[in-house]
Image: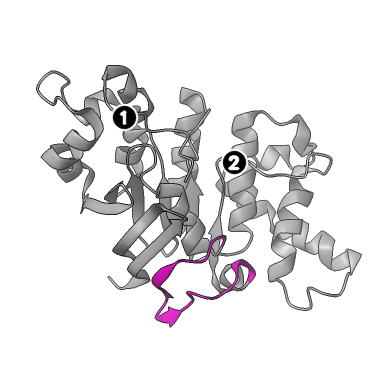
Amino acid sequence: MTDVIELSGLTKAFGATVAVAGLDLAFAAGARHAVIGPNGAGKTTLLHLISGELRPTSGRIRYDGRDVTRGSRVKRSRLGIARTFQQPTVWSSLSVADNVALAAWPHTPARGTWLRSRYRSLAEDCGRHLETVGIATLAGRPAGALSHGERRMLDIAMALAAEPRVLLLDEPAAGLTEHGVERLLTALRALPPEVTVVVVEHDFAFVSALADTVTVLHDGRLLATGTPAQITADAAVRAAYLGDLDELGDLDELGDLDRVGEAGGPHVAGEAV
């Protein structure tokens, strides 16, 4: 399996604070790859760097063999890198279908020329993305009337409208009910196998159910990479999360890593950098 994204010595500093420190990491084409770590580990910053929201202080980012380190967010999006953020971003006054069509428009030929007929055709074509995430029946509803879970699904459908090769998801399960999490997993499992999914998440039960590879960051550095089972068995990972391992059992039994802080270890969610 070839690597679609390769990071070499990737570093991002905010003044004296180093959020990502000399990271060497690769994401295989078609992988379902999760990135986890304690609060402040650099997870969201990593997604910002890959998507082009931030420029690295040093290091290189290669996408499909091409150096995109200095490429803009728009350029990377057009090359095939799409992402979502911790809070779904939708146009509340527009319909669900119109939201997806507008997200797709910048990736169409002659996107600078407005044609209502082409827009209608695009909105109809985007229905398949709504089918993928399970909200096709909501196509005509105003996005502002959706529940949080439905907005999350719409956000993912809008990212898929760019026809990405790489989909970056930042805490997609946050705020979802148990049913919403199952719905999200079903949607992500339905994605084409050629789409690489990189997900930052604090719910390890969700990570275990989705990811074939898990990378753990700690203080902006690579702590471990492996299968979910290998990660839960890794003493260094358990120490980074939990401190006293003997009293707390397995990570996969704890489920939501956001609650690990209640047991005496670092708090995971709500990462600032």
Element type at mark 2: helix
Kindly identify the residue that appears in the image at 47 percent across and 74 percent down.
Answer: 69
Residue positioned most to the left: 246
Amino acid type at circle 2 is: Met
Quarter assignment of residue 150: top right
Q: Position of residue 192 (x, y in %)?
A: 46, 59
Per the rendered image, the range of residues in magenta is 53-74
Residue closer to the observer: 21 or 107: 21
**Left or right position of 136 against 267:** right
Q: Disc 2 or 1, which lies upstream in sequence?
A: 2
State the residue position of label 1. 266
Q: Position of residue 145 (x, y in %)?
A: 76, 30
Residue closer to the observer: 24 or 113: 24
Residue closer to the observer: 233 or 177: 233
In the rendered view, would you say 115 is above or below 158?
below
The color scheme shown is: one colour
User: Would you call the spot at circle 1 few (<14 residues within 10 Å), some (14-19), or many (20 or more)?
Assistant: many
Q: Position of residue 66 (x, y in %)?
A: 44, 81
Q: Is residue 150 magenta?
A: no
User: Would you call the spot at circle 2 few (<14 residues within 10 Å), some (14-19), or many (20 or more)?
Assistant: many
Element type at mark 1: loop
**Left or right position of 271 against 102:** left
Give the label on residue 153, or none.
2
Cα separation between marks 2 and 1: 30 Å
The mark lying in front, picked from 2 and 1, is: 1
Kindly identify the residue that appears in the image at 61 percent across and 50 percent down.
Answer: 157
Kindly identify the residue that appears in the image at 23 percent across and 43 percent down.
Answer: 228
Amino acid type at circle 1 is: Pro
